[in-house]
Image: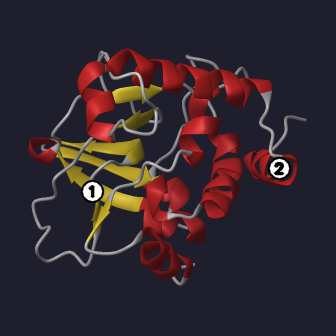
Amino acid sequence: MAESYLDTLKKAIDTNNISSKARSAGNWFRSVVNRARGKFSSETPSGILAKHEAAANQVLGKMYFFTYNPKWKKELPWYDTFPLVFPIKTYSNGFLGLNFHYLNPKERAILMDQLKSFASNKRFDESTKLLLTYQTIKSMGRARPTIHRYLGSHVQSKFVLINSDEWEVALFLPVERFKKASKKQVWAHSGGMY
């Protein structure tokens, strides 16, 4: 049986190491950044997106990074301007998706381990996607704080596709960009929702 995302995270914390797959995905991410400016620590999410090739099209059940400026940001208590999302339903003016940034890294790993059972195949390569619907996930308490509606007219960047062999790294990259609250405040609130 494949190692769970939670086990991978625990092992990385305990041994200060990561798996070769995670290392490879991390190297890919760093190479994107290095091509952009040459320094991983000084790159911004929007800078990465601006210099990365756009996804050909958005596919339900695939993972994406993008920048977002919510229509109702004045009314929202907080929001993430650099979501990491699995779209699960499309609308004429946008989509519904799971934004993993609303969970702390441990909870992201637990939820992702639960969602792996909905994978379209067991290869976990560029062909793999999650076969999710709102009906599928509404009973998963941990997923509740991740469900957000995104308006297409408020997406401010290209969508960057993250293939399933890169999910492990993308889940744990500290690139969430919350406005009006700290990530710890958001994560504490999310923890009270399940």
User: Does label 1 or label 2 sit earlier along the sequence?
Assistant: 2
Disc 1 crowd rating (10 Å Cα; few below 14, some 14-19, many 20+) is: some
Residue drawn at (53%, 45%) of the image? 173
Seen in the picture, residue 176 relative to 22 is either above or below; the reply is: below
Pointer 1 with pointer 2, Cβ within 8 A: no
Report x, y in % for residue 109: 67, 53
- Label 1 element class: strand
Say which amino acid is labelled 2.
Asp
Residue furthest to the right: 1
Residue 179 higher or lower than 85, as above or below: below
Q: Residue at x 56, y 78 (%)?
A: 191
Residue at left 19%, top 44%? 94
Q: Is residue 152 above or below residue 193?
A: above
Q: Which residue is mark 1?
A: 149
Looking at the image, which residue is at 10% across and 60% down? 71
Q: How many marks?
A: 2
Label 1 amino acid? Answer: Arg
